[in-house]
């Protein structure tokens, strides 16, 4: 596969807090960085996403007295996993991994900045109705094939892939450029969900 003018690489949340030593580390999350750097050199069109939470975000366990990380609470948009405080605006943990080299990225999309709603997908908030504006951006630039990489495979990459396909884009997930949190079997569930939608994970080696 050779990336063309209508392809876009969307790099999901390769931030310090999602890497070893961060507040919500994805196991071996930093392993994706050199893979993504190599891939990015082949793409003319790149979007970076960045989790960007206020300090009192609804999804933080610390904002729910008596609750612990990874417990579930009810939100207006459905069940919400509570997370350790992470990717708080203007903190080091919210910054991109220092070794990420994607200077040609034309857009940085910040998500999760509304205090009362979480945002996994690059395309919609977790209510699955409130758009981030990315669909319009891609369509205006006539980008039709979405290639996803980053963190975490079983949350933000999964939801981005599902929403991209529902929006009518052709979607590929580069599985060896992703890592999973794997909360209660979420990695296996993600593979099944993507398979059921006809989204087949591919390898970075599939790009010429």
Image (tube, rainbow, N blue to C red):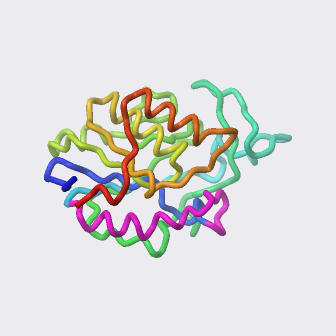
x, y percentage for residue 105? Answer: 29, 62
Quarter where residue 2 is shown: bottom left
Does residue 53 belong to the magenta stretch?
A: no
Q: Where is 154 relative to 9, above or below?
A: above
Front position in the image: 65 or 120: 120
Please report the bounds of the magenta region as a residue range: 20-43
Left or right: 177, with 183 as reference point: left
38 in the magenta segment: yes
Residue drawn at x 31%, y 40% is: 171
Q: State the image coordinates of residue 142 (x, y, percent, origin top left).
A: 15, 42
Question: In the displayed structure, does residue 98 sit left or right of residue 68?
Answer: left
Q: Residue 155 in the image: state x and y as whole percent.
A: 54, 42
Q: Quadrant of the C terminus?
A: bottom left
| Of 167 and 201, the residue lying toward us | 201
Give percent across and percent down for residue 182: 63, 46
Single out the residue that lies furthest toward the bottom. Answer: 99
Q: Nearer the viewer, residue 205 or 170?
A: 205
């Amino acid at each position: 596969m050779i990336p063309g003018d209508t392809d876009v690489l969307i790099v999901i949340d390769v931030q310090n807090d999602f890497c070893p030593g961060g507040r919500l580390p994805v196991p071996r999350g930093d392993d994706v960085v050199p893979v993504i750097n190599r891939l990015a050199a082949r793409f003319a069109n790149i979007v970076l996403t960045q989790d960007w939470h206020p300090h009192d975000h609804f999804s933080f366990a610390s904002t729910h007295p008596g609750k612990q990380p990874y417990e579930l609470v009810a939100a207006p948009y459905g069940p919400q996993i509570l997370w350790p405080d992470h990717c708080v605006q203007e903190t080091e943990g919210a910054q991109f991994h220092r070794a990420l080299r994607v200077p040609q990225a034309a857009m940085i999309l910040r998500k999760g900045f509304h205090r009362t709603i979480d945002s996994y997908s690059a395309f919609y908030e977790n209510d699955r109705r409130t758009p981030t504006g990315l669909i319009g951006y891609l369509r205006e630039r006539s980008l039709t094939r979405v290639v996803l990489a980053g963190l975490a495979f079983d949350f933000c990459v999964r939801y981005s892939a599902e929403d991209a396909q529902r929006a009518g884009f052709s979607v590929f997930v580069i599985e060896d450029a992703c890592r999973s949190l794997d909360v209660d079997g979420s990695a296996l569930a993600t593979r099944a969900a993507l398979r059921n939608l006809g989204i087949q994970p591919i390898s970075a080696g599939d790009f010429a």
